[in-house]
């Protein structure tokens, strides 16, 4: 089952690249959330997408919005990946139970063991307002995220 526009976003708590717990519902009432699922750290398309977020940081991480990027990589792998690429937003590990959050959003590819590229824009009330799902090899556009956030204003 895929999480859909107009539904409450499934809540979760995952560890980030620094080992800190991050809970989606903690952003309710305060920030919109761009929730990005991606297949694997250290791969070309994933690195490109996350570096775009890095390069447009203030567009997506500010007083009104934050970005949470989720993969099934371990927190230690995510820490090295973040350091290598200069990524400062939260990279969350859906490592164990393996893919549980990705499954809750309908983004987990059972035959591959990792999530596809899926993005959900969640408003301050915790409701999914926009989403896009692409194939593993198809990059998403950060301009689409910006447009979805502008529509919330």
Image (cartoon, rainbow, N blue to C red):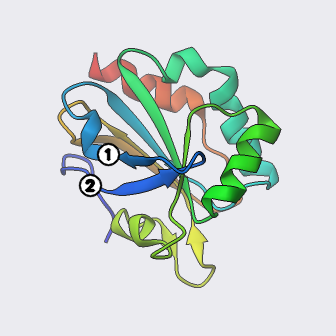
Say whether residue 153 is left or right of residue 15: left
The C terminus sits in image quarter: top left
Is residue 138 visible from the viewing direction of this image?
A: no
Residue 33 sits above or below residue 57 on the image: below
Quadrant location of residue 127?
top left
Query: How many numbered badges does the structure rendering display?
Result: 2
Residue at screen point 26% across, 48% down: 5
Q: Residue furthest bottom?
A: 111
Label 1 environment density (alpha carbons within 10 Å; few <14, some 14–19, many ≥20): some
Label 2 environment density (alpha carbons within 10 Å; few <14, some 14–19, many ≥20): few
The reply to whether the C-beta atoms of the residues labelled 1 and 2 are less than 8 Å apart is: yes
Measure the alpha-carbon separation of dots 1 and 2: 6 Å
Residue 70 sits above or below residue 146 on the image: below
Q: Give coordinates of residue 152: x percent, y percent.
A: 28, 23
Which of marks 2 and 1 precedes in the sequence?
2
Question: 23 and 6: which one is in front?
Answer: 23
Q: Give coordinates of residue 92: x percent, y percent.
A: 52, 51
The N terminus sits in image quarter: bottom left
Question: 72 and 79: which one is in front?
Answer: 79
| Residue that label 2 marks | 11
Question: 136 and 26: which one is in front?
Answer: 26
In the rendering, which numbered label is found on residue 24?
1
Residue at screen point 25% across, 24% down: 30
Quadrant location of residue 76?
bottom right
Q: Give coordinates of residue 26: x percent, y percent.
A: 26, 39
Question: 72 and 59: which one is in front?
Answer: 72
Residue at screen point 67% across, 47% down: 139
Q: Give coordinates of residue 148: x percent, y percent.
A: 39, 29
């Amino acid at each position: 089952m895929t999480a859909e526009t107009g539904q409450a976003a499934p809540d979760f708590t995952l560890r980030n690249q620094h080992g800190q717990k991050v809970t989606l519902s903690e952003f309710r009432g305060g920030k919109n959330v761009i929730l990005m699922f991606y297949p694997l750290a250290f791969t070309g398309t994933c690195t490109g997408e996350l570096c775009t977020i890095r390069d447009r940081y203030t567009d997506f991480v500010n007083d009104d919005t934050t970005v949470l990027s989720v993969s099934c990589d371990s927190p230690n792998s995510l820490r090295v990946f973040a350091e290598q690429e200069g990524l400062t937003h939260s990279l969350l590990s859906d490592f164990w139970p393996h893919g549980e959050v990705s499954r809750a959003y309908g983004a987990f590819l059972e035959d591959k063991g990792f999530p596809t590229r899926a993005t959900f824009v969640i408003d301050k009330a915790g409701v999914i307002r926009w989403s896009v799902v692409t194939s593993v090899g198809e990059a998403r556009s950060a301009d689409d995220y910006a447009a979805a956030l502008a529509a919330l204003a």
